[in-house]
Amino acid sequence: MNARRFFLVALGAFLIWMGTLAVVIASKGDNDFDGFHRAATYLLTEGQLSSARDIERYPPTFQVLMLPLALVPVGVAAGLWFALNAACLLALPRLFERSMGIPLRAQLPAWLLAGPLIPVNLQLGQSAPLLIFASAWSIERLRRSTAGSALAGFVLVLLGALKVLPFAFLALPTLLRRIRVTWIGVTLALFACGGLLVLAAGRDEARASCERWIEDVHTQSPWNLVQSERSLRYANQGLGVTLARTFGDFESNRVKGRVELLHLPLRFVWGAYFVLLAVTGLLTLKIVLHARRGGDMEDWLRGYAAISLAMLMVSPIVWTHYFLWWLPAGLALRHKERALMILAACSLLATALPAARSLGFHIFTTLCLLVAIERTQAAEARGPVSLAAC
């Protein structure tokens, strides 16, 4: 058996095992997907949107888009959801090769970096593989033609209706002169999502659910999470929570795995938080605007990667498996092969150590990846430097 065939057999066995595990766990009510299915089933049977705690952070449209899976039992639905995400995962290497010109061998460091986070996503019944595939496909449609921008805008809005943060990718067509055509698709998708929401739940319930969700979003800031003692355990590496947990002077009995280095007043912690957010915004803007001048595939890939990293930096709640969004950054920095492999090993070790996650290893690495992309871009702008030489 040659190496390629052995790899395919091993991959198939891994996916079968993970799929079986995801279905069993969902059937027992022990992962995220069973909550998604329960909310969609409630909407199907009661005609009302669920306000259960496990889906309160998701937009109301999430339940509507999950509605088809409520037509089958949770075990079958979990299997279908797993198959969809697994198919997207398997399609990603070919997508990057065909659309971005990145050979499979050159993708290896990026996959080593993000790969250890894949099993957790699949086991929990989360949607990162689907979101990454669909957003990468949309970015490529945006890059290739103005006509494809409308479809890309439509797809990006659907992704935002599932998880909110992918709305950030609309910054690319906004800054890269694709805005008019893109917003045709955006407008159509907004009307479609709103129409489906009203059709499924009724006008009054749809409006009330949107108001409830907006009110809840306002409580998701890091300072509100600290004040209400929510999502403060080590697995949440959101920037604000990590800074408060590590350097902030506050007492809480609900901070599992906390590692305290300093006891600074929280006003200083939030000041540092906003400074880091400003740095993130400036770096991301610089990377994306460079694509406006250059416009080749490498510039668009860096813009896509920068926005993916910025999403992680801005989000108040970032569970460790969210860092699968490092994948575009790994591709953008694929020429730094040795550094990515070392980082992949460190990331795997940090994932296994609650103290490292409590200290925010992954979120601060996210900022370092953003800086590395900007530095690589700046080095190329100073002269005709090849990727291999960087």
Image: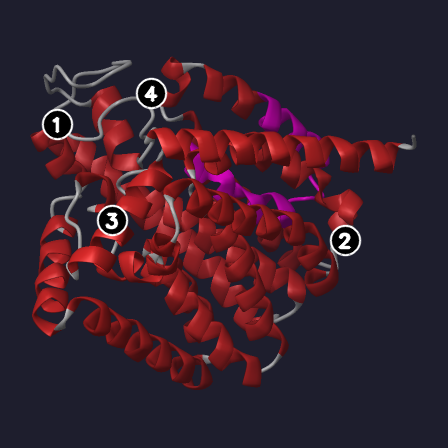
Q: Tell me how far mark 1 sits from mark 4, CA to CA.
A: 15 Å
**Mark sitting on residue 39:** 3
Q: Give how far apart the Cα atoms at labels 4 and 3 are.
A: 31 Å
Q: Which residue is mark 2?
A: 386
Magenta stretch encompasses residue 340: yes
Up the image or down, 41 lies above or below 367; here it is: below
Three-letter residue code for mark 2: Ser
Residue on which disc 4 sits: 358
Considering only order in the chain, which callout, 3 or 4, is on the residue closer to the N terminus?
Answer: 3
Nearer the camera: disc 3 or disc 1: 3
Instruction: Confirm whether the magenta stretch covers residue 178.
Output: no
Residue occupying the point 9% across, 54% down: 215
- In front: label 1 or label 4: 1
Q: Which residues are magenta?
A: 320-345
Q: Nearer the viewer, residue 227 or 163?
A: 163
Are the residues flagged by discs 1 and 4 in contact, CB closer than 8 Å?
no
- The circle on residue 229 is 1
Disc 1 marks which amino acid?
Glu
Q: Do the numbered discs 4 and 3 sit on residues whose CB atoms are within 8 Å? A: no
